[in-house]
Amino acid sequence: STSTLETYDVTSANEWQSDTITCSKSVCNVICDTSSGCYSAIINAEASQVFSLTCSSYQSCAYLDVRTGGSISTTISCTGQESCERADFTIYNSPEIDVTCDYLTSSSSNSPCQYTKIEAASVSHSSNLTVSCNSDYACRY
């Protein structure tokens, strides 16, 4: 139902750069698939039960600050060159957390998740945290 779903689809370069996205519905999808589309932005998804973030372009989510709280499921996908470089993901009380960093490169400077910080706080022992670094240099530092 559209009353429980909201989608932010960044369609132009720098669209949400240094801006704030506040997810207010139970399902929130943020798609940053343009160059620097969500660069240095803040995403507040504390009200969402299901949160997904897709960063698939050059520095699309670099220096991003994401905060979730009480999510049933949190999915983050960083598949562009330097897409999530120096991003800060703070995920509270989410039993299912899946972070994927995957960008095929032969250069360490193109890492999708270099210097990325993931903090999973207040999660139970039954929580499932999966961080996948699927290519060389994917999770450098």
Image (cartoon, grey):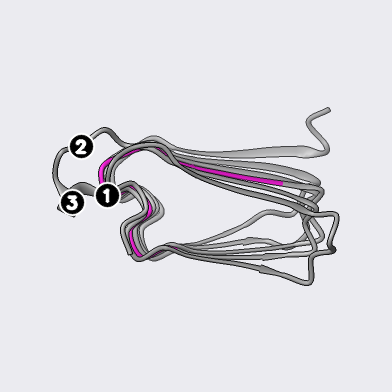
Question: Considering the image in quadrants, where does the C terminus appear?
Answer: bottom left
Residue depicted at x 16% and y 53%: 109
Residue 129: % across, % down: 67, 52
Q: How crowded is mark 3: few (under 14 residues within 10 Å), some or many (20 or more)?
A: few
Residue 111's disc number:
1
**Total numbered circles:** 3
Q: Where is residue 74 in the image (x, y as percent from the top left)?
A: 68, 48
Please name the residue shown 83% across and 27% down the image.
Answer: 1
- Inspect the image, locate mark 1, and give the three-letter code of the amino acid beneath it: Ser
When the figure is inspected, residue 63 is found, relative to residue 95, above or below; the finding is below
Q: Distance between the Cα atoms at labels 1 and 2? A: 8 Å
Left or right: 141 in relation to 76? left
Which mark is drawn over residue 108? Answer: 3
Q: Mark 2 points at which residue?
A: 105
Q: Is residue 84 above or below residue 90?
A: above
Q: Horizontal placement of 36 versus 43: left or right?
A: left
* Region of the chain picked out in magenta, as a range: 74-87
In which image quadrant can residue 106 be found?
A: top left
Q: In the structure shown, which secondary structural element does the residue marked by tag 3 occupy? A: helix
Q: What residue type is labelled 3?
A: Ser
- Tell me the crowding category of disc 2: few under 14, some 14 to 19, or many 20 or more residues within 10 angstroms, Cα based: some
Q: Residue 138 carries which label?
A: none
113 relative to 13 in the view: left or right: right
Q: Is 6 or 136 nearer to us in this picture?
A: 136
Q: Give the secondary structure at mark 2.
A: loop
Alpha carbon distance from label 3 to label 1: 6 Å
Given contact means CB atoms under 8 Å apart, are the residues at marks 1 and 2 in contact?
Answer: yes
The crowd level at tag 1 (other Cα within 10 Å; few <14, some 14-19, many 20+) is: many
Task: Give the secondary structure at mark 1.
Answer: loop
Say if mark 3 contacts mark 2, CB within 8 Å.
Answer: no
